[in-house]
Image (tube, coloured by chain):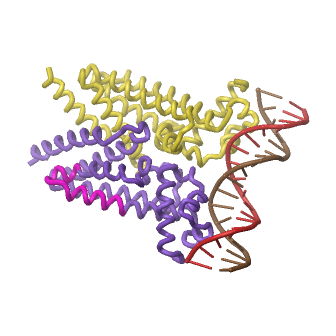
Chain colours: A purple, B yellow, C brown, D red
Amino acid sequence: MAIRATTETKLLDAADALFFSAGIGATPIDAVLEKAGVSAATLYRGYPSKEALVAAALERRQLAWLDVWDAAIERAASPRDRVLAVFDALESFRLRADGARWCAFLGSAAEYADPPEEIARAVARDTAALRDRLRDLAEPLVGSRAAALAEELLLIVSGDLAMRLRGPDSDTTVARAIADTILQAHERAGTADA
Amino acid sequence: MAIRATTETKLLDAADALFFSAGIGATPIDAVLEKAGVSAATLYRGYPSKEALVAAALERRQLAWLDVWDAAIERAASPRDRVLAVFDALESFRLRADGARWCAFLGSAAEYADPPEEIARAVARDTAALRDRLRDLAEPLVGSRAAALAEELLLIVSGDLAMRLRGPDSDTTVARAIADTILQAHERAGTADA
DNA sequence: GTCTATAGAGAGATAGAC
DNA sequence: GTCTATCTCTCTATAGAC
């Protein structure tokens, strides 16, 4: 990577702020360069293409998201709250200064009918992380039903994110209510199994 | 509208197929023209801009969606199944030849940080139709809880659609399972109220 | 009512100087 | 390691002929 670390940070900051709020296709690379205060030649020394910059911004963003999620999990008192912590994390992450308009990962997936390899990988990683972590968090609570519960929670999380496209005044209240209900149902059913 | 009806149909067919699968930004107007077998001058005689064509395609698509949904509701035997019919309709609509990659309305909302008036209206209409109809369908089943249930179902529907971005092998099974559970919960709670 | 041809703007990426 | 300047391509929309 023939590019200075401080320059790279400036590029990724600008890329993150513009691509995931205004949209990738809607953001010319020039806008990123101007916001970062970096020239085109420098960008293309570090990244082979616009898509590579998008992928790098997605990777950095996922690390940040997992940190926020981890912190929310640590604040949770019970196994049940640890499962629901994903909604606290969603709320925190949305309120950050660099919060995307809805979801950087789903948004990137939506922009490409046939996504560039690197971007497809970043989105797949996000999905896998959500799925796997939700399953691990659910396991102490509902045992063998953890995978099924995780799949349902993944859909609810994605639904909460998608709802941000339908109106600006959406928080996690509705998603949390649904999650609460299905959690109860799985807990009950798990007890019945045993 | 100084444009022939058959020509307009060809334009809207092409617009629908390309915009809502490949993406609006990713589809040059030339691609629509070529697929429709229509020239640029003709398009711009009927529509003032690309966005106007998008909006017209969205409007036509919503009528088609509501027809499919209506048919699914009519096939349903019980008030409960009438609520759940939205998932049958989602499945039918997805399997149509001109099915979008995920959702034409959410996809259009996602592509614009600040959407053109006409497109914002079309998306808002889709959201309102979903919300209002779900509430009306829920009312016979859960009475005063209908609005709350409808809001939850709207999130689940949106989540089902968003999940199509995370992987190609998604059907409505998970969404239906969640809906089934929250429906039961609201029915029980409604009985407890009375 | 529809076409061909093109204007004019803006995009992504590169060459060569410092 | 970064910059200025620019090349080349593609896009939306329009002018004028038939």
As displayed, is residue B134 above or below residue D14? above
Q: Camera-side residue: A113 or A178?
A: A178
Span colored in magenta: A63-84
Work out whether residue B37 can be spotted.
Answer: yes
Q: Is residue A64 magenta?
A: yes
Q: Position of residue B116 (x, y in %)?
A: 57, 37
As displayed, is residue C14 above or below residue A150? below
Q: In this image, B55 relative to D15: left or right?
A: left
* Residue A50 in which image quadrant: bottom right
Which residue is at 33% across, 24% downward? Answer: B135
Q: Position of residue B181 (x, y in %)?
A: 23, 36
Q: Position of residue A191 (x, y in %)?
A: 10, 46
Work out whether residue B167 can be spotted.
Answer: no
**Taken as a whole, is the magenta stretch helix, strand or loop?**
helix
Q: Is residue A36 magenta?
A: no
Q: Camera-side residue: A103 or A191?
A: A103
* Residue A156 in which image quadrant: top left
Quadrant where the C terminus of chain B sits is top left
Q: Camera-side residue: A133 or C3?
A: A133
Instruction: Give the total of numbered labels.
Output: 0
Quadrant where the N terminus of chain B sits is top right
Which residue is at 24% across, 21% downward? Answer: B143
Q: Position of residue A27 (x, y in %)?
A: 57, 53
